[in-house]
Image: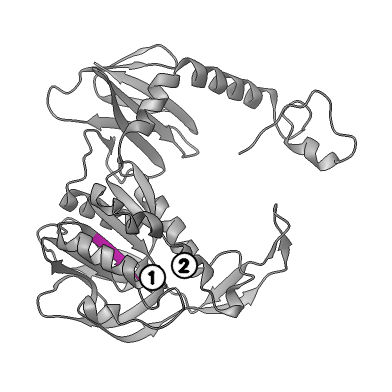
């Protein structure tokens, strides 16, 4: 969100005044006070906040510029595309797992930057240059973990069909896509571009049943919505989840020292998060701190990150939920015994905290 505080309200473009903190009617004084307090905390805790940015990410999401440009004509006016929708879903599903997430571009992959990550997520990147696919394959051969979601790796930057699926050991028998049921009116964006919302039909959610493998045995059913592929995998693939008809839905394929995981369906966000939780564990993603909900249940809409700062141990937690949440902080024995809230300057004994709705807390751990 962008804010501004002009000395005088605009008399020429009245709509600009709506986002003015000093003159807009949308912001109550209490919210303005909170914003000013946040700005002061940003200045006072600048070193602590910068420490979180310095923590290297071990999980990356592929940002494919090629997939944003190669679009069928009917999608040119859509507000989002299958790739961008899956990209957003992947980010939202991964942000509540207590680990920093970043994006890696095709150019960065060609510069050899995949080696710094333990897990790569490929969200419906339909078109990618062949040399990018080769770098991803080489990354897996040398120990990396890759999760691929349909429809990925079907064409190159010139929209020429590729045979990367067979390279992965997959035979795609059928692809079922939800059909656009109607489009909304054209809406002008902030950049003066025009776009329209799209509604889909025949998009009934389906359940995936686990096969109770060692790594993924703790996951219950997953829910899918959207595209669905009927496929076969080579004999050395491990089936992790099945469709209701018994066919493979998510498989693990060994590649050299690493592995490629292939999902034949687009998952709902919370189901996606549960799958990623297991993949983070399997890939060995570093997470010194884990949040647990008091009373049980998944941690959702709560973001937590750990960062060292010299000899200090820092933790931030953001509660995006509309209600307060009570949670416990899980760490190795002896890692900490108390917390100091650096914003409110109060001590927390033990490992349980309550964070109000829509609030951010920064703690030092002792």
Residue 30 screen position, x and y as percent? 64, 23
Residue 216 screen position, x and y as percent? 17, 59
Residue placed at 55% from the left, 17% from the top?
Answer: 40
Q: Is residue 356 visible?
A: no
Q: Which residue is mark 2?
A: 66
Is 141 left or right of 40, judged from the image as shown?
A: left
* The quadrant where residue 299 appears: top left
CB contact under 8 Å: marks 2 and 1: yes
49, above or below 83, in the image: above
Q: Nearer the viewer, residue 295 or 103?
A: 103
**Which element type, helix, strand or loop, lies under badge 1?**
loop
Magenta residues, dominant SS class: strand
Q: Which residue is mark 1?
A: 129
- Classify the position of the N terminus by image quarter: top right
Label 2 vs label 1: CA separation?
8 Å
Sequence-wise, the earlier of marks 2 and 1 is 2
337, above or below 148, in the image: above
Question: What span is in magenta?
Answer: 146-150
Is 15 left or right of 31, judged from the image as shown?
A: right
Residue placed at 22% from the left, 75% from the top?
Answer: 168
Q: Nearer the viewer, residue 202 or 272?
A: 272
Q: Nearer the viewer, residue 35 or 161?
A: 161
Magenta-drawn stretch contains 227: no
């Amino acid at each position: 969100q962008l804010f501004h505080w002009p000395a005088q309200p605009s008399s020429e473009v009245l709509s600009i005044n709506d986002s003015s903190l000093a003159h807009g009617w949308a912001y109550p004084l209490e919210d303005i006070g909170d914003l000013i307090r946040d700005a002061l905390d940003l200045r006072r805790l600048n070193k602590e906040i910068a420490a979180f940015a310095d923590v290297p990410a071990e999980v990356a999401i592929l940002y494919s510029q090629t997939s944003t440009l190669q679009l069928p004509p009917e999608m040119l006016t859509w507000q989002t595309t299958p790739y961008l929708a899956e990209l957003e879903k992947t980010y939202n599903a991964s942000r509540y797992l207590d680990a920093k997430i970043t994006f890696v571009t095709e150019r960065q992959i060609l510069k050899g930057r995949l080696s710094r990550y333990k897990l790569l997520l490929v969200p419906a990147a339909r078109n990618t240059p062949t040399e990018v696919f080769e770098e991803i394959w080489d990354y897996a051969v040398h120990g990396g973990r890759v999760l691929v979601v349909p429809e990925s790796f079907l064409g190159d930057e010139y929209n020429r069909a590729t045979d990367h699926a067979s390279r992965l050991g997959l035979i795609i028998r059928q692809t079922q896509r939800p059909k656009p049921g109607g489009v909304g009116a054209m809406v002008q964006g902030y950049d003066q571009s025009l776009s329209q919302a799209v509604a889909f039909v025949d998009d009934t959610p389906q359940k995936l049943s686990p096969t109770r493998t060692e790594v993924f045995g703790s996951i219950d059913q997953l829910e899918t919505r959207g595209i669905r592929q009927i496929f076969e995998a080579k004999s050395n693939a491990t089936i992790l989840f099945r469709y209701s008809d018994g066919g493979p839905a998510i498989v693990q394929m060994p590649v050299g020292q690493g592995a490629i995981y292939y999902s034949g369906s687009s998952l709902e966000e919370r189901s996606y998060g549960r799958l990623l939780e297991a993949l983070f564990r399997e890939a060995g993603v570093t997470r010194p701190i884990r949040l647990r909900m008091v009373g049980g249940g998944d941690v959702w809409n709560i973001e937590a990150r750990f960062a060292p700062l010299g000899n200090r141990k820092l933790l931030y937690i953001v509660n995006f939920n509309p209600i307060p949440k009570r949670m416990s902080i899980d760490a190795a024995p002896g890692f900490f015994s108390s917390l100091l809230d650096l914003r409110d300057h109060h001590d927390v004994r033990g490992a349980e905290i309550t964070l109000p709705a829509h609030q951010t807390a920064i703690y030092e751990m002792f």
